[in-house]
Amino acid sequence: MGVDVDVVLYMKQPPDRAALERIVADLEDPVEDLVRKDSLFKKLELDPDDYVGAPDAVIDLLVERKALLQRPLLVKKGKAIIGRPKDRVGEFLS
């Protein structure tokens, strides 16, 4: 698409609390969507309802458990989205 991007390998260089706060502030999706509800989430016996509309709870969780960060996450000019489904990516970057 000819777009210049910075790729962040979040497992090697996870976003800190301040970065997550900026992402949450700019997020166009529901904040709870930043959390992957995968096997780790279930293994930890977390309740998805605890994160609905709860930015502080989402940030606390993602600071502690970086593997639960939903991806891909795209940030551009004060806006952020989760790149799922992937057809959202092209529209966001254009």
Image (cartoon, rainbow, N blue to C red):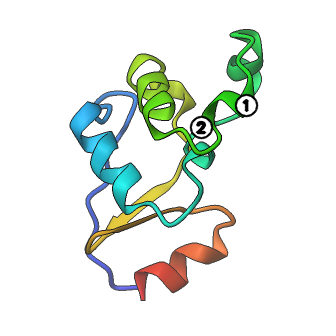
Mark 1 residue crowding within 10 angstroms, few (<14) / some (14–19) / many (20+): some
- Image position of 65 with respect to 12: above or below: above
- Image position of 8 with respect to 18: above or below: below
In-front residue for pair 55/63? 55
Residue at (65, 76) in percent of width and height: 87
Looking at the rendered structure, the secondary structure element under dot 1 is: helix
Mark 2 residue crowding within 10 angstroms, few (<14) / some (14–19) / many (20+): many
Left or right of 55? Residue 75 is left
Residue at (64, 36) in percent of width and height: 36
User: Picture coordinates of residue 89 (x, y %)?
Assistant: 53, 74
Marks 1, 2: nearer the viewer: 1
Left or right of 12? Residue 57 is right
Residue at (64, 61) in percent of width and height: 84
In-front residue for pair 4/27? 27
Q: Which of the image's four quarters has the C terminus?
A: bottom left
Residue corresponding to mark 1: 48
Residue at (51, 36) in percent of width and height: 69
Separation of residues labelled 1 and 2 (CA atoms): 9 Å
**Outermost residue toward the bottom in this view:** 94
User: Picture coordinates of residue 74 (x, y %)?
Assistant: 42, 62
Looking at the rendered structure, the secondary structure element under dot 2 is: loop
Q: Amino acid at mark 1?
A: Pro
Are circles 1 and 2 on residues that touch, CB within 8 Å? yes
Residue corresponding to mark 2: 35
Q: Which of the image's four quarters has the N terminus?
A: bottom left
Which numbered disc flags the more N-terminal residue, 1 or 2? 2
Q: Amino acid at mark 2?
A: Val
**Mark number displayed over residue 64:** none
